[in-house]
Image (spheres, grey):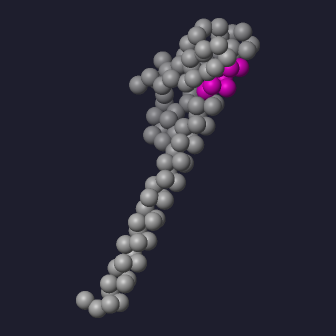
Amino acid sequence: MNTNKIVTISVVVIVALITIPTIYKAYQKYEDNLYDTVEKKVIESAEKCYYESICQEEKITLAFLYSHNYLDKVSNPVTKEYYNEESYVERNGNQFKFIIKE
């Protein structure tokens, strides 16, 4: 094997070692941002319902938000499957957290 082939192979390997993890991290960040966007949308709807004194329970289900027109049907942004209507937003004081049921 001559020197040019060894250098070329080495460069290709080094570039692959740098680009593959970078692309993977960028894609993971992209997916995380998609999930965060959907979660914020659901939580904002639950907060609106709570502050309008319609939802006073500790657990506000998606079905309740759908039926009272606070939220349109939401889906997993990656798989495009609709979330279970039994998924809920848990309220603890003024803190809200979206819990997904399978």
Residue occupying the point 49% across, 53% down: 25
The answer to whether residue 25 shows anywhere in this view is yes
For this rendering, which residue is in front, 100 or 12?
Answer: 12
Residue 6 painted magenta:
no
Q: Position of residue 29 (x, y in %)?
A: 53, 48
Q: In the picture shown, does residue 28 fall above or below 96?
A: below
Numbered range of the magenta stretch: 42-48
Q: Position of residue 8 (x, y in %)?
A: 37, 83
For this rendering, which residue is in front, 99 or 13?
Answer: 13
Question: In the figure, is residue 100 to the left or right of 53?
Answer: left
Residue occupying the point 58% across, 37% down: 36
The answer to whether residue 71 shows anywhere in this view is no
Q: In the picture shown, does residue 30 fall above or below 90?
A: below
Question: Magenta region, mostly helix, strand or loop?
Answer: helix
Residue occupying the point 65% across, 8% down: 56
Q: In the picture shown, does residue 24 fall above or below 51?
A: below
Q: Position of residue 28 (x, y in %)?
A: 49, 48
Q: Examine the image and state in which quarter residue 37 appears.
A: top right
Q: In the picture shown, does residue 73 fall above or below 35?
A: above
For this rendering, which residue is in front, 94 or 55?
Answer: 94
Question: In the figure, is residue 76 to the left or right of 46?
Answer: left
Q: Position of residue 11 (x, y in %)?
A: 40, 78
